[in-house]
Image (cartoon, rainbow, N blue to C red):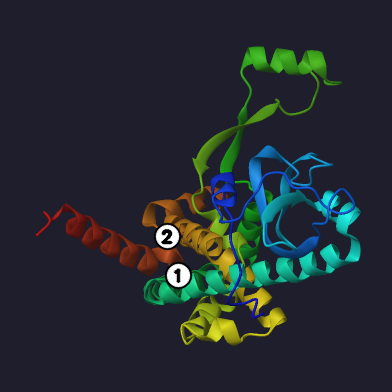
Amino acid sequence: MDLDQNVVVIDNYEELAGRPGFAPSLSFHPQGDRKFGSVVAPYRFRDTIACGIKSCHTQHMKGYLITTSDGLETGIGIDCGRKHFGVHFTRQKKQIDDAVQRKRRIDTVMRAVQEIPAYLVTVTELKRDYQHLTDLKRRFMDVVGVRVFAELKERADRGNTLITKSVPMTKSEAEAHFATTNRKKGDRKDWPEKEVPVAKLDGLEFIRTKFTDMLVTNLIKPLERFAATKPGDAEKMRPRALYNEAKWIGKVPGDIAKAREVIRAGNAFFTSENLMKLVHLEVDIQPLGPMLQDLREAERLLAADQSQPDA
């Protein structure tokens, strides 16, 4: 039997019970002459059903459709199959499980092949955004230098987006401070200070992320490679190659969503308003002047374009 071509899929009990020759309860040897035939397909239901072996009837949700020596069919639980039909059942169960798993993986790849045009659009968008943000990042690093960029990355790694400054405590705050610390009012030390927020840096997630690895190595290049896949290729794949392909495809939607989140973060970081906040970190803004001017012009053009009525 060519299992790739003859895999049966059972999604609910109605499909199981509606099969020709299906019986919910059958007697098997030694209670009768009927014997185990073969495993047809696995099933998993939300509600329990009784095992089709009349002497068993154990409730189960996960089991297998089997045939009998006299051409009938019934459903049995996994443990029931092992107990009553032994190694014959176990071997066929494994063959069917492997065939079903292979079919599901082939279906996953085939569905993705049908979506190749959409993937190519996604690749084009991601490559464009990647190149734009990479150019901005290089320009920014050239201007602010390694030290400032390293400080921003450290902030990003800690999730510290808030910029604060130290200001003197009020009289009541200082009194509470003196009451809860070893300091005493009137000592020779400076008046106690507190940290207050002055700005919040947007898009630091972009600084933290290994952008090239995420976008190019793990997403763009594999998508470009996959775009060459033809509809019949999945059925020719060896088990390990099919497993890897199906596993990767399963991760693609989530990886695309993550990439777009990072791109949104990058666009949020590289705005004129956001970069101006760096003055609160004692960054010299003057060398950033030309970059800020270009960002403002890009923002002006974008705002003008968005204000245009739809054609």
First in residue order: circle 2 vs circle 1: 1
User: Hey, what amino acid is under mark 2?
Assistant: Asn
Q: Residue furthest front?
A: 33
Mark 2–mark 1 Cα distance, whole angstroms, equals 7 Å
Q: Position of residue 246 (x, y in %)?
A: 61, 71
Cβ–Cβ below 8 Å for labels 2 and 1? Answer: yes
Residue 284 visible? The answer is no
The image quarter containing residue 190 is top right
Residue 88 visible? The answer is yes
Secondary element under disc 1, as helix, strand or loop, is: helix
Q: Position of residue 12 (x, y in %)?
A: 57, 47
| Quarter in which the N terminus is drawn | bottom right
- At 53% from the left edge and 81% from the top edge, which residue is drawn? 221
147 lies left or right of 123: right
Q: Position of residue 222 (x, y in %)?
A: 55, 79
The image quarter containing residue 20 is bottom right
Q: Residues within 10 Å of mark 1 (few under 14, many from 20)?
A: some
Residue closest to the eye, 152 or 183: 152
140 lies left or right of 65: left
Q: Is residue 249 above or below residue 34?
A: below
Residue pointed to by mark 1? 133
Q: Residues within 10 Å of mark 2 (few under 14, many from 20)?
A: some
Residue closest to the eye, 9 or 140: 9
- At 64% from the left edge and 14% from the top edge, which residue is drawn? 171
Secondary element under disc 2, as helix, strand or loop, is: helix
Q: How many marks?
A: 2
User: Hey, what amino acid is under mark 1?
Assistant: Leu
| Quarter in which the C terminus is drawn | bottom left
264 lies left or right of 165: left
Q: Position of residue 203 (x, y in %)?
A: 50, 54
Q: Which of the labelled discs sits on residue 267, or is there none? A: 2
Residue closest to the eye, 110 or 226: 110
